[in-house]
Amino acid sequence: MNSKCRYIAAAVILVLCAYVMTIIAGCGQKSTGGEIVIWEQKDPEEQIILNRQLEAFTEKHPDLVISTVHFETDVLHSQFQTAALAGGGPDLVYGPSDKVGPYSVMALIRPLEDQFDRAFLDEFEKGSVPVLDGHVYAIPDQIGNHLMLIYNRALVDRAPRDSDEWIGMCAAATRDLDGNGFPDQFGLVFNYMEPFWLVPFLGGFGGWVMDTENRPTLDTPAMVQALRFLADLRNRHKVIPKECNYELSDTMFKQGRAAFLINGPWSLKAYVNAGLDIGVTPIPMITATGMHPTPMVSSKGYSISVNVPEKKLPLVRELLVYLTSEEAQRDIMTELLILPSRSTLFRDPALQENPILAGSLAQARLGRQMPDVPEMRAVWDAIRPFYQSVLGGQMEPEAAAREMQQRAVKKIAEMKQ
Amino acid sequence: MDRPRTGMNPKRLIWLFLLPSGIVIGCVVFYPFLYNFYISTTNMSLYHIRDYTFQGFANYREIFTEPDLYYYLMKTIIWTLVNLFFHLVLGISIAMLLNRQIAGRAVFRALLILPWAMPQYISALTWKGMFNYQYGSINLILQKIFHVQGIEWFSNETWAFVAPILTNIWLGFPFIMVVTLGGLQSIPKDLYEAAEIDGASPIQRFFHVTLPMLKPVLTPAIILGTIWTFNNLNVIWLVTERGLPADKSHILVTYVYKAAFTYYRYGYAAAFSVFIFLILLVFVLFYIRQTRTLAAAT
């Protein structure tokens, strides 16, 4: 071989090596005919149940390999988007229903009404199956995500009747235990840094985040009253810590340093495991309006990637049906105290006779469906800074409501450019 | 010059050796950069993710009409300058201490490098916990030892900016320390002896011997430090929980991150990242030119 040939051969080998490495790095998750890949954002305890269910499924399909890849919610979203746009990614993607909006707009997931018959879809609780522009985009294995009031029976013996009584009970439970002049036990804790925790109160004063045309409705008297109500809890009644994020509220409640907590169904099992005697009840009715707070209710479920080839679809469908079956959902319900999405399970004694699940269901019934449209991102982001400013005492509720509306309208317009 | 035994032309051999790194740099630096620039001239967004079209410099025009641009730019400059100042002061001071014959020098050196060796993500979350109002170690010290009210770190705009700055100072000074320590060990002792004989005070020796001799190692370190700090997304994003309070703790890169991953405005975010690149390019060119001018003058 002469030198020129060697040179060319070496160059070709190098380029091939680089190409192969790129393929390996970029397409490591791409599935083949005998493999189904699931990307999920489940909590560790849910992952254990999922793995057990997948093992049972593969026993029926010995040639099938199912692999799961776990991501945090936001990371899953961006990773799936990147991978699916490039023609790769998983076969099934699992997550909360509000992610379905952006996925469907970008055509990353398949409409499912052609994949499943109407009778199957009707087996799910009304409103739990995400539908956008007339298309079904996910099959849920649970509903919830709704905030509720959780109380520590060691500190308060019963649920409050309304918000006035609740504030009184919170004030009585807020104490300086070590006598250093600063309270170290609070009546109420919740992640009031995030607007998700504001929404129930917005509903309690008669408002909501969007109208039926998906236009933000934030500059309303209801928003002003809800902001003032929460600011008063912090600044006037002083029954919540001066700063309180998710971790702090969770830790304080687990340590018995908070009488009431507002949190979601994902957290219930951990409080039981921590040995707390908890009660679960809807967030108390707002005395001034006589209305119940309305937390957002959404489902979590599986969507099929648009990149799943036709010949693989029957197997992927079968797995999806299995993972959302009554049997699978009963596992999640009984082991993790999370509400199912199948209507039949709502009549199950395991749900009806469990006071925690019954309390969670009572709250879910009072909640409202979370809008699954992409515009919600702009709404969250518009509420957050001004809501935080009101809680921090740097802004009046009226000005905050006005500003958040303007910002939401502006950001939605920018998103649609 | 004799040809090597392979019979290959030496120049071609050099190119062949350079080829793998050239391919890698082309794939991971030049292609993404050019692609980013291309995206910045399109309307790629959530609603135009597959059917985006060329729209010239519209995104760039929009950047300069963004009312928050100058606020975030000013915050970014303050963030970078304050961090760099403390990185240099702490890094050089500690390096000079470690350059002396002190007991346990190796132990101190290892301990002081730890912040740099820790993953930034972990450090940022640990510091976030330390700033916690109720349970954070800083407020506990203030309350239990000094009997004063804890600081509301993330309710106040100033404190919310101080928190990530403190975190990043802790994270960043070991880099300057390590670089300086290497530089200090290469300064000939004769120079200090000569300066001492000439009657130079310790401060004069520092400014007229140590600092000029450290310049070759400090110049690239300062350039890198500036770029890393200017573009440091992790610390701000994690410590302030996405800009607490009320989006007041953003710097330009966190703003770009939001534009891209909250609002799916890929074209706009790409244009913004080109804008950030240009700011840093101008800084680096200016800084290199200044240091060369100073070197020529001395």
Image: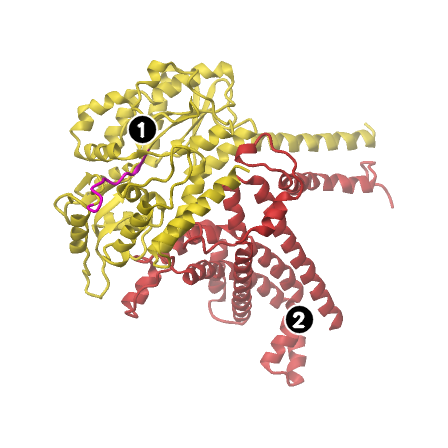
Numbered badge on residue B212: 2
The answer to whether residue A289 is magenta is yes
Q: Is residue A32 above or below residue B54?
A: above
Chain shown red: that is B
The answer to whether residue A354 is magenta is no
Q: Is residue B154 above or below residue B197?
A: above
Residue tagged by mark 1? Answer: A142
- Depth order, front residue of A250/A306: A306
Picture quadrant where residue B291 is located: bottom right
Looking at numbered disc 1 in the image, what kind of residue is underneath it?
Answer: Gln
Q: Which residues are magenta?
A: A287-297
Q: Tag 2, which secondary structure?
A: helix
Q: Write the residue at 65% across / 62% down.
A: B219
- Depth order, front residue of A286/A299: A286
Q: Colour of chain A?
A: yellow
Image quadrant occupied by the C terminus of chain B: bottom right
